[in-house]
């Protein structure tokens, strides 16, 4: 049956009860409504199979006991004419109260927790207040003789009502209030309390029926409706909360309002009874005892509230001062640590630590692995620092070690941190070698903010040295100012046409003629003159300007290549890409657009450094493979200076190696370098790769490379980097010199 149909049926049945004359028929209807209500609860349990089956079973049992009491009452009244006080029905009624209460409690709580004491105290306060009012205004102690069973029963019934009222107060803070079935149950209990109170206070009848019967019938109807309502399936006790959250729940606004009103009951009762001029000797002891208990309970509640506020204040402070990912201090927590620790006796030292290439880790493996790396680094840094200072996370990949120590001790901490990161960091999906750069700043006079800025400058300087640790000195501030100024000017250099490409010739050692050029970026600064790429490309990589710079190089080289072809000069082009470019997911598409503009992919070579391809092998190899599928050639630049292995070299889809000029410059005078060059040439031939030697500055070196079967060469002897308009003349001059050299030899 639908819940609303049962509700309609119950209302009609109640109307039938009050319409029928007092006697066997009406009393039978009364008992019948109770039986149907219990049957509805059982049917609801069977149909919906709620998570709190035990609680609903107790509710059904409590209701069944009351129906059994009604049936016993009807039997006695019909068989004996009058019902004695007390009767067996009364004892059945009284057993039903605690059983029903237990069922209601299990709907709200799954077991007992220490934090529930607060709810119990709230309920006790309300129970005492309500009990005092019933004792004085309903029970009338002067008219009750508790030495008899009837008198004792007259006290026990109000006591059960007091108990149920206290339970209702306990439910005020329950999260189940959002459930319709739970609200129907609470309304049913309220009707029982109202009916019991009405039965004691007034003797009002309707068509010969006691008005209190409406409350009891309403209880049966609402309980049956609640059990048949679909929401009863979702009505279950919440997951166990911590004692702190349970105590906090006992201080919600409705509960506090009810408890406050209850605490004021005692003085109100005293005032009313004094106005009625009732003798103090007869009632004063009960009021005083109740007031004493209430004061003690309120004191306990206030104490719990103060402790809760203190605990929550501490928790909020920890949350505000703590980094959620690592559990370390954040900037706010670090500032508090600095304020607390006395830095007058010993200087304040900052060690700013930055995880190298952290963005590459996030781009390649995802932010989840990045978070794992941050946590692992934080753990190792904390262990390395120990009790010598405090560690805070001040950025996505930055940590600040603050300590009151001396310079040599600060450098010792930096050494220990580097040592702790020698072992690879193992995450769920990757094993990574992590490097960090550490900047140290120390001052007994400067503010913490100044020391922090100095540590940042030192950390930036540490990225260019080994081991990656630098101590701040005043020159770093000057260098940083110059770099910032240069960076601001670089952002507009492209639009103002201050960037220019120079080209360095490459010669085929077999044919002994110029076959290609390498494009080299130069900055024609209006004040500083020609600036080499080493001075601005590292900044461009860190700030994201490297993408528009590469777009400029691709566009200019393509245009220049087509112009040379119209002049009858067919030279292959080589361009360099940086780490950031190689990890840019749009690189392949940008190269494709250049090829679509008319450039033959076989005439384009993209040079990469070992370190750029090895930083994130999976992503690098995937990008290189896509570039190779476009038809362009790939070369490893500066081979021999990186840290890749032969295993990686076999995996990379490259066709050319470029020997770093460090080994070529003095190969004629340094036997070890000559061996390295020869071995690299042999390795390339074995792997099916072509080889280009950089740094050729004299004819003897060129001819020696030819004898070693090197494929290509470039260097100052072959040709210095020159603007595009000088390339045609340079090609003619070089080819003539090479022809003459070949003829004379």
Image (cartoon, grey):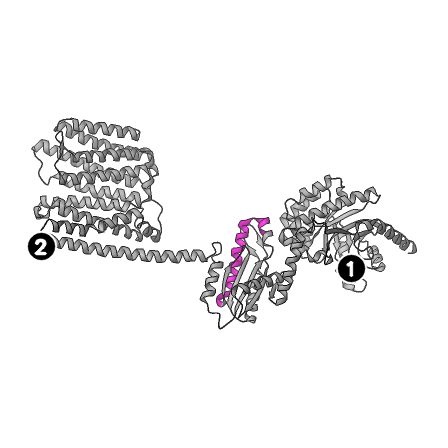
Instruction: Residue 193: give x, y in percent of width and height.
Output: 20, 41
Furthest-bottom residue in view? 345
Residue at left offset 21%, top offset 48%: 127
Residue at left offset 22%, top offset 44%: 164
Residue 114 appears in the picture as rendered: yes
| Position of residue 469 in the picture relative to residue 211 (left or right) | right
Instruction: Residue 236: give x, y in percent of width and height.
Output: 33, 41
Q: Mark 2, mark 1: which one is toward the viewer?
A: 2
Stretch of the chain drawn in magenta: 360-387
Instruction: Return the residue nearer the eye: 415 or 177.
Output: 177
Give the spatial CA distance, label 2 vs label 1.
116 Å
The residue indicated by pointer 2 is: 281
Tell me, yes or no, whether the highlighted magenta stretch contains residue 225: no
Tell me, yes or no, whether the highlighted magenta stretch contains residue 373: yes
Instruction: Please rate how many residues cluster around mark 2, counting C-alpha atoms within 10 Å: few if below 14, some from 14 to 19, many from 20.
Output: few
Instruction: Return the residue nearer the eye: 155 or 705.
Output: 155
The residue indicated by pointer 1 is: 664
Q: Which quarter shows the C terminus? A: bottom right
Residue 49 appears in the picture as rendered: no
Q: What element carries label 1?
A: helix
| Position of residue 713 in the picture relative to residue 476 (left or right) | right
Instruction: Please rate how many residues cluster around mark 1, counting C-alpha atoms within 10 Å: few if below 14, some from 14 to 19, many from 20.
Output: many
* Rendered image quadrant of residue 20: top left
Q: Is mark 2 on a helix, strand or loop?
A: helix
Q: In the rendered image of this protein, does residue 360 appear above or below residue 674? A: above
Instruction: Return the residue nearer the eye: 265 or 414.
Output: 265
Magenta residues: mostly which secondary structure? Answer: helix
Instruction: Give the mark nearest the N terminus, 2 or 1.
Output: 2
Instruction: Residue 50: give x, y in percent of width and height.
Output: 33, 38
Per the rendering, the mark at residue 86 is: none
């Amino acid at each position: 049956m639908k819940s609303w149909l049962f509700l309609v049926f119950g209302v009609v049945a109640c109307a039938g009860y009050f319409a029928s004359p007092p006697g066997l028929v009406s009393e039978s209807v009364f008992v019948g409504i109770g039986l149907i209500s219990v049957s509805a609860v059982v049917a609801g349990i069977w149909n919906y199979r709620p998570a709190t089956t035990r609680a609903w079973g107790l509710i059904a049992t409590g209701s069944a006991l009351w129906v059994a009491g009604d049936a016993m009452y009807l039997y006695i009244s019909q068989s004996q004419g009058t019902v004695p006080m007390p009767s067996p029905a009364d004892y059945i009624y009284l057993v039903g109260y605690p059983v029903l209460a237990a069922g209601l409690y299990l709907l709200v709580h799954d077991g007992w927790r220490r934090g529930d004491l607060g709810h119990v105290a709230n309920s006790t306060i309300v129970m005492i207040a309500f009990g005092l009012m019933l004792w004085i205004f309903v029970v009338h102690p002067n008219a009750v003789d508790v030495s008899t069973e009837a008198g004792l029963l007259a006290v026990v019934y109000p006591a059960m009502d007091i108990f149920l009222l206290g339970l209702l107060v306990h439910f005020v803070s329950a999260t189940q209030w959002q459930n319709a079935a739970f609200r129907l149950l609470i309304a049913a209990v309220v009707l029982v309390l109202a009916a019991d109170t009405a039965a004691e206070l007034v003797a009002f009848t309707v068509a010969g029926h006691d008005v209190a019967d409406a409350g009891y019938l309403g209880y049966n109807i609402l309980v049956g409706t609640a059990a048949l309502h679909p929401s009863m399936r979702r009505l279950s006790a919440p997951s166990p909360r911590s004692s702190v959250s349970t105590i906090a729940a006992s201080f919600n606004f409705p509960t506090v309002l009810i408890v406050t009103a209850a605490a004021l009951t005692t003085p109100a009762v005293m005032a009313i009874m004094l106005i009625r001029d009732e003798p103090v000797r007869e009632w004063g002891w009960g009021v005083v005892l109740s007031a004493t208990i209430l004061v003690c309970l309120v004191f306990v509640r206030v104490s719990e509230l103060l402790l809760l506020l203190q605990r929550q204040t501490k928790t909020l402070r920890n949350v505000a001062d703590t980094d959620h990912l690592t559990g370390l201090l954040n900037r706010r927590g670090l500032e508090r640590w600095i304020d607390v620790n006395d830095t007058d006796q010993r200087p304040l030292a900052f060690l700013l630590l930055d995880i190298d290439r952290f963005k590459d880790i996030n781009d390649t493996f995802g932010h989840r692995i990045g978070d794992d790396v941050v946590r692992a680094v934080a753990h190792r840094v904390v262990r390395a620092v120990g009790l010598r200072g405090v560690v805070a996370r001040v950025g996505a990949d930055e940590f600040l070690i603050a300590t009151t120590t001396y310079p040599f001790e600060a450098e010792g901490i930096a050494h220990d941190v580097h040592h702790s990161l020698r072992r690879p960091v193992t995450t769920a999906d990757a094993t990574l070698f992590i490097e960090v750069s550490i900047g140290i700043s120390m001052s007994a006079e400067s503010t913490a903010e100044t020391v922090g800025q100095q540590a940042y400058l030192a950390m930036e300087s540490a990225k260019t040295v080994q081991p990656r640790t630098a101590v701040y000195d005043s020159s770093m501030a000057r260098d940083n100012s110059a770099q910032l100024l240069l960076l601001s000017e670089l952002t507009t250099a492209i639009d103002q046409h201050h960037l220019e490409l120079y080209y360095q010739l490459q010669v085929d050692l077999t044919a002994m003629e110029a076959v290609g050029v390498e494009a080299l970026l130069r900055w024609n600064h209006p004040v500083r003159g020609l600036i080499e790429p080493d001075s601005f490309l590292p900044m461009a990589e860190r700030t994201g300007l490297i993408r528009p710079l590469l777009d400029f190089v691709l566009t200019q080289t393509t245009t220049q290549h087509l112009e040379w072809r119209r002049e009858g000069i067919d030279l292959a082009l080589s361009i360099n890409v940086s780490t950031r470019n190689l990890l840019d997911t749009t690189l392949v598409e940008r190269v494709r657009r250049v090829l679509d503009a008319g450039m033959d992919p076989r005439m384009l070579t993209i040079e990469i450094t070992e370190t750029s391809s090895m930083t994130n092998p999976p992503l690098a190899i995937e990008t290189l493979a896509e570039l190779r599928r476009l038809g362009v050639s790939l070369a490893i630049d500066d081979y021999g200076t990186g840290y890749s292995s032969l295993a990686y070299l076999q995996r990379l889809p490259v066709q050319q190696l470029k020997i770093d000029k460090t080994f070529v410059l003095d190969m004629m005078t340094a036997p070890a370098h000559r061996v390295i060059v020869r071995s690299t040439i042999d390795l390339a031939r074995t792997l099916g790769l072509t080889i280009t030697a950089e740094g050729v500055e004299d004819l003897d070196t060129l001819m020696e490379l030819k004898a070693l079967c090197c494929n290509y060469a470039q260097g100052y002897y072959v040709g210095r980097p020159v603007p595009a308009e000088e390339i045609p003349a340079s090609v003619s001059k070089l080819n003539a010199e090479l022809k003459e050299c070949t003829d004379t030899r």
